[in-house]
Image (tube, rainbow, N blue to C red):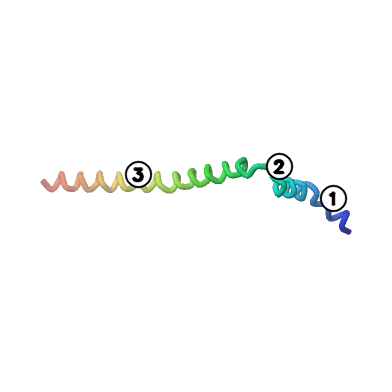
Amino acid sequence: YQKQAYQKYKSKLDKLMAELQGNLSKQEDSGTPWLKILGIATLIALPLIILAMIILRARRRKLAREK
């Protein structure tokens, strides 16, 4: 049973063992999460900035009409 289980998960085990031994650098994997975080932050911030600009323009126009 152990041999069958090892053969089934051999690729995952080899990768984990290599990482534990220091053969694989964690820097390669750390590049992707930063890009995801930056992309998500941009997708959240951009609509908020656009909304704020629209509100400010509407207030300016309203004040200009009252004068």
Type of residue at label 1? Gln
The residue sitting at 82% across, 51% down in the picture is: 8
Q: Which of marks 3 and 2 is in front?
A: 2
Residue 23 has which mark? 2
Where does the image place residue 25, in percent across and percent down from the top left? 65, 42
The residue sitting at 56% across, 46% down in the picture is: 33
Residue 43 has which mark? none
Q: Is residue 15 left or right of residue 31?
A: right
Q: Sequence-wise, which precedes: disc 1 or disc 3?
A: 1
Residue indicated by mark 3: 50
Residue indicated by mark 1: 7
Inter-mark Cα distance, 1 to 3:
55 Å
Q: Sequence-wise, which precedes: disc 1 or disc 2?
A: 1
The residue sitting at 44% across, 44% down in the picture is: 42
Where does the image place residue 12, in percent across and percent down from the top left? 75, 49
Type of residue at label 3? Ile
Q: Residue 53 appears in which quarter of the rendering?
A: top left
Where does the image place residue 54, in percent across and percent down from the top left? 30, 45
- Where disc 1 sits, the SS reads helix
The residue sitting at 20% across, 45% down in the picture is: 60
Observer-nearest of 36 and 14: 14
